[in-house]
Amino acid sequence: MPMKILGKDILAPNIARFVIEAPLIAKKARPGQFVVVRHSEKGERIPLTIADYDADRGTIVLICQGVGKSTREINRLGTGDVFLDIMGPLGTPCPIREGGTVVCVAGGLGAAPLYPKIKALHRAGCRVITLLGAQRAELLILKEELAAVSAEVRCSTDDGSYGQKGFVTQLLREVLQKEQVDEIIAVGPVPMMAAAVQVAEEFHVPVLVSLNALMIDGTGMCGGCRVTVGGKTKFCCVDGPTFDGSAVDFKELTKRLSFYRREEELVDHSCRIGLGRGES
Amino acid sequence: MANRQAMPKQDPQVRSGNFQEVALGFSEQQARSEAERCLNCKRPLCVEGCPVEVPIPAFIARIKAGDFPGAVEKIKEKNSLPAICGRVCPQETQCESRCVLGRKGEPVAIGALERFAADWSREHTGAKPPAIRAQRAQKVAVIGSGPAGLTAAADLALLGYQVTVFESLHAPGGVLRYGIPEFRLPKAIVDQEVAYVRSLGVEIRTSYLMGQTLTVQELFAEGFQAIFIGTGAGLPYFLNIPGENLNGVYSANEFLTRVNLMKAYLFPEYDTPVKVGEKVAVVGAGNVAMDSARTALRLGAKEVSIIYRRSREEMPARREEIENAEEEGVVFRLLTNLVEILGDETGRVRAIKCQAMELGAPDESGRRRPVPVAGSESEIPVDTVIVAIGQGPNPILLRNTPGLELNKQGYIQTDPESLATSIPGVFAGGDIVTGAATVIAAMGAGKKAAKAIDEYLQKTSSD
Ligand SMILES: Cc1cc2nc3c(=O)[nH]c(=O)nc-3n(C[C@H](O)[C@H](O)[C@H](O)COP(=O)(O)OP(=O)(O)OC[C@H]3O[C@@H](n4cnc5c(N)ncnc54)[C@H](O)[C@@H]3O)c2cc1C
Ligand SMILES: Cc1cc2nc3c(=O)[nH]c(=O)nc-3n(C[C@H](O)[C@H](O)[C@H](O)COP(=O)(O)OP(=O)(O)OC[C@H]3O[C@@H](n4cnc5c(N)ncnc54)[C@H](O)[C@@H]3O)c2cc1C
Ligand code: SF4
Ligand code: SF4
Ligand code: FES
């Protein structure tokens, strides 16, 4: 079903936030769930996390980072435009614990999928310490939104342009050295999640991650989103995307994510230098 | 008795390089000659072989008389998707297997005639929606838009109900859309049949994953008074062998969905890619495996082989499809069992490890059980492995519908006569009840359910 964009703003270079009219999805959405969108007749089916939802207004928020052809094209849509299809909510909601201290670690765009979880944890009486990491200051997104629902927000940037210089996993280590933590949720690029899991294991704290396998249907029909968790094959779109981080085979996930890199570069190149489709 | 007319086909050399339809269909002349062969039996056994009881002699008689629009009208009394069934029904085990002519010679080419009539009317007159009887107030929801759902929806609309179909993918048709390839069933035909169902007043809402977007309980709350579930058997099975998650290992569903639904064969015009490489191994020997193998050839693979544990006789695919695949150059490695998939350091498939099998004593199914031959392991270099060993029920709707009883295999438990489930007002049919079967069986179930739903609604409204 086509869905209308009610509002759009740019959070950072290449990262756009859309408010979309999607009453049914807004009513059903839970933290950790996602949608699959199609922005054009010839476009791919792209999974995007539901970054916020408002059942009363009937809206959902999607935050999209332009990394390839489809996501760049999505980010060219504006207020008043429509998404051809948005299907959801998909996936199993993230378990929300009641009470205790939870550290939420976001790498880059990971802040978007984390936001609804942090909001829910906050509402469930948890003390949430949010750690936000990005390459540089301008890529740190949702700082204010997250601050409103976290007990504490700390930031790091790879280049030191904001907050502590270095990786966000360093911040995690520092928190764990000082605090009694009941749970960690880490969302971001695969290497960052893998590193966060390592730190969590060192301190024997349970850790949840949100995996971003390549997907087609998002409904358990193709098996393309297979991930190995605890030695077993799982379908990320149905069984996940949230999994117990210490059971995830990150090496396999990294390899599977790279499978179409050449094709992705091919289409993205022709898209960026403005060639028509199919002429490259 | 004249010989059965042969179906004209694209040359194997040519067709293995394109996605156009393989079988070209009868000419008018051929159709009339073939129709001449039919004896117009008083007690037509062929009809008993058809799960929806198409009035076969009657429609063939009209072809014989040159009344092609009349022929299709006759078929549509029982079968609302003749252009599809004429192409994909396993006629050799259904209608044609019962034709009296088959006892001594070759049966009438019923499927090809059905296809001819449907194609003729599509090309010449277009599908005319029949006049719909009294408009009824009751609303019926259909979940899934495969052949079961589309048929139930069409029949219910013809009975005057207000029907809404909810489909999870962005395009309707089920396996007809994402599974069966263009060269066997052109998507323009699926579009046409879907348009026909819409022309009856059926509303089709795509991108609704039922159980998540809306639940069965919510449908009732929204005023739907009966629900038909036709969600198919879309969950792909894997072998659970080492290496199955390497890059280059696809389920047949993923491979075919990328190509059919997402049109990856037109990449980069369409954005979704697919990779086949030079050498492809397809595991399994059913229709799905044949479709995958032949699709891989058309995408440019140099060598495509079918890997199957049993022997030729046990291959479950239709004979015609096996022959088509063979003609196009698919290699059959029979009595061969896949034990492991081997990858390179980047995580990409480089070879498969196989084991030779021999046939031992018969198993429960009566087929001789394949047993491994000791010391027969060998490695075959391949870039791509497509796993086509079967599908099961997708759990999403089922686990979100409390009170819905399932059978041991996880399919929906129904009353065999009415297709009623354990929830009052909810009916189910097609692959989600029987496990992977056929298009026509799914349509038959859709028809049966439409009738049962009508009876149910008449009863509840008069209570
Ligand atoms: C459950 C889930 C939720 C997601 N939520 C969001 C979200 O809220 N916002 C958002 O911007 N993105 C999200 N993603 C990732 C997003 O779907 C991909 O970035 C997108 O599919 C890339 O498509 P593309 O054609 O633009 O880029 P491509 O040309 O396909 O890829 C460009 C680059 O990104 C990498 N890439 C491709 N797909 C993925 C992926 N799934 N994960 C990580 N890297 C990938 C490629 O390897 C390549 O290097 C999510 C993914 C999943 C599975
Ligand atoms: C590759 C392939 C080739 C085949 N070849 C032949 C052939 O030559 N001849 C033949 O007779 N049969 C063939 N079959 C089998 C035949 O296609 C199926 O038996 C038939 O399509 C079953 O129909 P169905 O309506 O029960 O389900 P499907 O066709 O599977 O349709 C089910 C629909 O429900 C949708 N759905 C699922 N879950 C939900 C949900 N929760 N909410 C909303 N929608 C949902 C699905 O997306 C799908 O569109 C083939 C099957 C495959 C896979
Ligand atoms: S619907 Fe199928 S089985 Fe029935 S007559 Fe037509 S081709 Fe034969
Ligand atoms: S059994 Fe054969 S010959 Fe007799 S009516 Fe049917 S198709 Fe014609
Ligand atoms: S995306 Fe197809 S099964 Fe998960």
Image: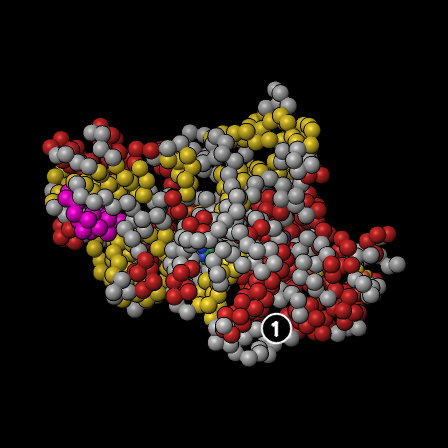
According to the picture, the residue beneath numbered tag 1 turns out to be B127
Residue at point 48%, 39% (across, down): B248
Examine the rendered structure and indicate whether residue B32 appears above or below residue A16.
Answer: below
Examine the rendered structure and indicate whether residue B376 appears above or below residue B232.
Answer: above
Circle 1: residue type? Ala
In the depicted view, which residue is nearer to us: B124 or B415?
B415
Q: Is residue B350 left or right of residue A182?
A: right
The chain that hosts pointer 1 is B
Could you tell me what secondary structure mostly forms the magenta stretch? helix
Examine the rendered structure and indicate whether residue B96 appears above or below residue A179.
Answer: below
Task: Name the quadrant where ligand 4 sits.
Answer: bottom right
> Residue B439 location in percent, x, y?
61, 56
Q: Is mark 1 within 8 Å of ligand 3?
A: no
Residue at point 60%, 31% (across, down): B337
Query: Would you say residue A114 sits in the magenta stretch?
Result: yes
Residue at point 65%, 75% (across, down): B125
In the depicted view, which residue is nearer to us: B240 or A271?
B240
Quarter of image, res A164: top left
Q: Is residue A9 left or right of residue A227?
A: left
> Residue B370 location in percent, x, y?
65, 30
Query: Would you say residue A80 sits in the magenta stretch?
Result: no
Residue at point 22%, 33% (across, down): A205
> Residue A267 location in percent, x, y?
41, 51
Q: Do we see residue B181 in this rendering?
A: no
User: What are the residue bounds of the magenta stretch?
Assistant: A107-129
Q: Do we see residue B315 in this rendering?
A: yes
